[in-house]
Image: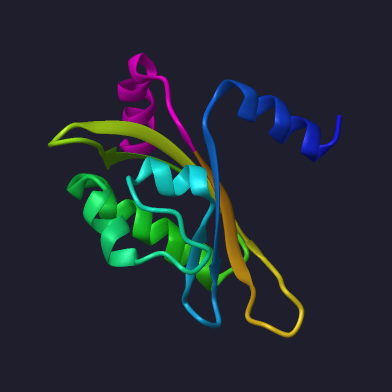
Amino acid sequence: MTDADVVEIFSTFNALGYWRHDLDTGHTYFCETLLGFFGLPSTEGPVNMMEISARLHPDDLSRVMEAHEGASAQPMSYQKIHRIRKEGDSYRWYCSTGRFRAKEGTSGEVVGITWEVVPHRCEGMHRLMTEH
């Protein structure tokens, strides 16, 4: 089974969003599905990170930013469970996995995927991700 097969199978069962962060420009780009997770309009340009940060649950924001900064500073992978604000004050649970990717002639980029997590499994997964 190829990586493309895995992504195709996985995306059949869950909404799956792709993103990348260019380390030289500091710009982050989302696919349309991921823009939809955040309730943002479609764009081919970089996303507004202030809008993204405002939609993350306040208790999750620092962990998400720490993981992203770590992957930007050195070749590493990460996975984080976090909440994104939906209508009103409700939140949905998501999981993001990212990793550093070398890009010739540049400082590289951080690329990843984000998908919605089944609600009844979220509390246990969040506990596992945050306990030390």
| Residue 38 x %, y % | 34, 46
| Residue 39 x %, y % | 32, 45
Residue at the spot 13% in from the left edge and 36% down from the top edge: 89
| 29 up-or-down from 39: above or below | below
Q: Is residue 78 visible?
A: no
For the view shown, which residue lies furthest in the right direction?
1
Q: Nearer the viewer, residue 34 or 78?
A: 34
Residue at the spot 39% in from the left edge and 41% down from the top edge: 37
What is the number of callouts on the image?
A: 0
Q: Is residue 107 visible?
A: yes
Q: Which segment is the magenta one?
A: 115-132
| Residue 6 x %, y % | 74, 31
Q: Quadrant of the N terminus?
A: top right
| 85 up-or-down from 69: above or below | above
For the view shown, which residue lies furthest in the front direction?
42
Q: Nearer the viewer, residue 27 or 79?
A: 27
Q: Main secondary structure of the magenta part?
A: helix
Q: Quadrant of the C terminus?
A: top left
Residue at the spot 35% in from the left edge and 60% down from the top edge: 65
